[in-house]
Image (tube, rainbow, N blue to C red):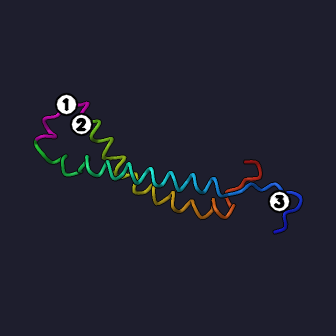
């Protein structure tokens, strides 16, 4: 592709790619912390049964984000290729 006409103003893809990679590292760090503090097997204990509604809600949200972060990290890794190659450029941003 020649850098002429419409394609002359294509921005660098380095910064958006680095931002996505930093997002991945942040999510991995958060996931590690959540893995140490939230265990799904805790739902089956008597201790969880005796907790109040608010602590149960906090624990459920933490566990949900822990499980969800696995998939979000995978999708972020998948996005790095298109971002780095410039396929995500829409002609404006």
Q: Nearer the viewer, residue 58 or 24?
A: 24
Secondary element under disc 2, as helix, strand or loop, is helix
Q: Are marks 2 and 3 in contact (CB under 8 Å)?
A: no
Residues at circles 3 and 1 in contact by the CB criterion of under 8 Å? no
Question: Who's the residue at 84% across and 67% down the image?
Answer: 2
Q: In the image, is residue 1 above or below residue 17?
A: below
What label does residue 78 carry, if any?
Answer: none
- Image position of 57 (left or right of 7): left
Q: Label 3: how many residues lie within 10 Å, few (<14), some (14-19) or many (20+)?
A: few
Name, please, the residue furthest toward the bottom.
1
Identify the residue under disc 2: 56
User: Which residue is the site of mark 3?
Assistant: 7
Left or right for 9, reference 20: right
Mark 2 or mark 3, which is nearer to you?
A: 3
Coordinates of residue 4 in the picture (x, y in percent): 88, 62
Q: Determine the image quadrant of residue 25.
A: bottom left
Which quadrant does the N terminus fall into?
A: bottom right
Cα distance, mark 1 to mark 2? 6 Å
Q: Determine which of the numbered discs, if any, sits on residue 52 in the image.
A: 1
Where on the picture, by quarter, is residue 70?
A: bottom left
In-front residue for pair 53/31: 31
> Counting other residues with Cα less than 10 Å from the Cα at mark 2, is it few (<14), some (14-19), or many (20 or more)?
some
Q: Are marks 1 and 2 in contact (CB under 8 Å)?
A: yes
Prevailing secondary structure class for the magenta stretch in the rendered image:
helix
Q: CA distance from mark 3 to mark 1?
A: 59 Å
Ranked by sequence position, the earlier of labels 2 and 3 is: 3
Q: Position of residue 47 (x, y in %)?
A: 12, 40
Q: What is the magenta range?
A: 47-56
Residue in the image at 13% along x and 46% along y: 45
Give the foreground label among 3 and 1.
3
């Amino acid at each position: 592709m020649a850098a002429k006409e419409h394609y002359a103003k294509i921005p660098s893809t380095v910064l958006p790619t680095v931002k996505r990679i930093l997002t991945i590292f942040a999510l991995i760090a958060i996931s590690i912390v959540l893995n140490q503090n939230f265990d799904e097997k805790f739902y089956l204990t008597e201790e969880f049964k005796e907790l109040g509604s608010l602590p149960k809600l906090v624990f459920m949200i933490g566990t949900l984000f822990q499980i969800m972060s696995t998939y979000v990290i995978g999708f972020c890794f998948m996005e790095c290729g298109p971002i780095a190659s410039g396929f995500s450029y829409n002609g404006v941003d």
